[in-house]
Amino acid sequence: MRHSLLSSVLLLVTLPIPVRADDTSEELLQKAKTAWERKQPEEALKLAGKAIDLDPKNAGAFLMRGMLYESRDKHAEAIADYDQIIKLDPKAADAYEHRGSELFKLGKITESIADFDQYLKLKPKEEPKHWKRGISYYYAGRYEDGQKQFEAYQNVDGNDVENVVWRYLCMARAVGVEKARAALLKVGQDKRVPLMRVYDLFAGKAKPEDVLAAAEEGKPPKEEKNMRQFYAHLYLGLYYESAGDQKKSLEHMRQAVEDFPARGYMGDVARVHLELRSKEKTKP
């Protein structure tokens, strides 16, 4: 009985979503959502494309397909769909937000800031929360703007070590490591391992090996251990960059990207960092 039920579920998940000749654009979008929930991303993309073909002015269809492209790391394709939304509605705030993120993932830092700015003009209440813009500011060399952005976010979440560290990184570039460390913001309890040791590192109360040791504590499961190692190497890479040791910085960032790859925006931050700094290193 159990085997039969499992087989039925697996069959349901793998079967294509039935499409009728008279399906509307909205019905096709609902089916695309169902396909996505069944972990059938290519089927979902195909259905979203059919919805767009049926109604080329359906901004919601472009948004869904753009987000599906995002999930597949097809950044250029996602940007093209967000472009279409903005053509249809220049005040479509979410399209600017998503496009800004995708532009960042392609290493187009200045362009990402422009889109984040436009998003925040349309949704000004979101400005304190926008840590992504702060990271773009850092890579654009706009350190004072980055510092202000992360200070604003501190009022949103006072337990986020990453936010405090990024403010430090901006300040270290602008006024030097000593002043940045002296002005390091207090943080609550970030439960993500090994981020509290990362905080201690930037505060001058721990060494790089302490961060790596913390990532190993408690014999975590493989997936959690990978994530811990990713964060350890990401922030060790950034720590060494702030200290002016570009060789060690790139070594740790390469480990974060290649040995312990992570999904999500911070995984993209590590990859973009490595690409940008590697290019800078090879410039004559």
Image (cartoon, helix red, strand yellow):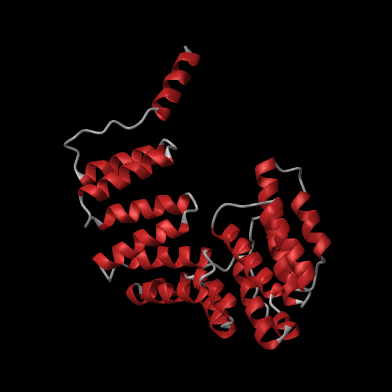
What is the residue that sits farthest to the front in this orientation? 284
Look at 47% across and 20% down and name the residue there. Answer: 6
Q: Quadrant of residue 45?
A: top left
Q: Is residue 11 left or right of residue 218?
A: left
Whether residue 123 is visible, yes or no, is: yes
Q: How many marks?
A: 0
Whether residue 202 is visible, yes or no, is: no
Q: Is residue 49 above or below residue 117?
A: above
Q: Is residue 77 above or below residue 223?
A: below
Look at 47% across and 63% down and name the residue there. Answer: 102
Q: Is residue 59 left or right of residue 112?
A: left
What is the residue that sits farthest to the bottom in this orientation? 175
Say which quadrant the C terminus sits in: bottom right
Residue 74 x %, y %: 47, 54
Q: Is residue 283 left or right of residue 138?
A: right
What is the residue that sits farthest to the top in this orientation? 1
Residue 49 x %, y %: 31, 47
Residue 212 x %, y %: 78, 57
- Observer-nearest residue: 284 or 200? 284
Q: Is residue 67 left or right of residue 236?
A: left
Q: Quadrant of residue 180?
A: bottom right
Q: Is residue 86 above or below residue 118?
A: above
Look at 66% across and 71% down and name the residue there. Answer: 279
